[in-house]
Amino acid sequence: MLPYMSLFGYEVLSYEVVVLIGAAIGISYFSLALLKLNIEKWQIVVFALLAFAVRYFVQNLIVDRELTFWNTPPIEYFQGWGFLMIALTIVFIKAFHWPARKVLDHGGIALMMASSIGRIGCYLNGCSGGKACDLPWAVVFPHHTERVHPTQLYMFALESMLWIFLIFFNKRKHYDGQTFWVGALLYSVYKIGIEFVRANPVFILGLTHTQVFSIFTLILSLWMLRFRGAKFYNAQGKSLKSL
């Protein structure tokens, strides 16, 4: 596709450029949301800088240099970027007493924005490809000979629809925190399904690492929405019928 592009006279990886653009858009959305929650500006700036720093550290010291006991770094499988950003957000929530549920609702949306745009980088780079197929829209990536599913474009479309849905849902949620767990639920279902056309190795019982972990997050999301969410909603003295 287009693994390299020229930028200010330098040849750079297209994947890196697009992923950074996605991260910038996601962090920008999140920062604006934090401003509306009356979070102090200096805290938002520090968070944004650390988010970029964490992304750089993981990519360069874990993924690229493969400082891991796994054949493939788990950061690639386990929705690693998302968990790192959630962990960083929780640190700030605890340290500066941010409104946890409201912040996580917006954080989930921001993660989907960044991830969806990053899929375009995957497509240009030819990574995260799919299994062989003969469909009319199948593609052949450089250094490959067979036609495969353009799973990167599938993921871009599905994740884009997900964050757009979550933005509208967040305006109609019944309680703070619901958007985050609805997003986690839908993302888990989507990741389980998309793996059937991706070319990832089987981990156990015919399932990939991502599918196994997504089953766990699916169960956790259902539990949080049905029981913890219902308990919190009921504590506000509201009807449970709409859950």
Image: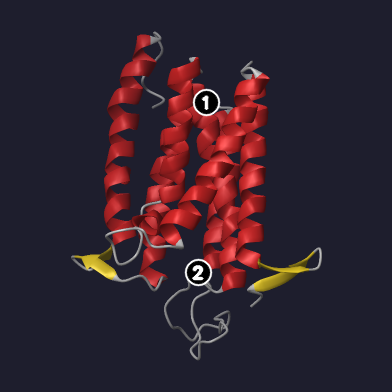
Quick check: can you spot residue 184? yes
Q: Residue 163 location, x and y as percent?
A: 57, 44
Residue furthest out toward the top: 237
Q: CA distance from mark 2 to mark 1?
A: 31 Å
Residue beneath disc 2: 151
| Residue at disc 1, secondary structure | helix
How many numbered markers are drawn? 2
Q: Identify the image quadrant of the C terminus.
A: top left
Is 144 left or right of 74, judged from the image as shown? right
Question: Which mark, by number, is residue 103?
Answer: 1
Residue furthest out toward the left: 205
Q: Residue 71 location, x and y as percent?
A: 30, 67
Residue visible at 36% across and 53% down? 78
Relative height, residue 28 to residue 240 (above, below) = below
Residue visible at 41% across and 25% down? 242
Residue visible at 51% across and 71% down? 127
In depth, the one of 73 and 100 nearer the eye is: 73
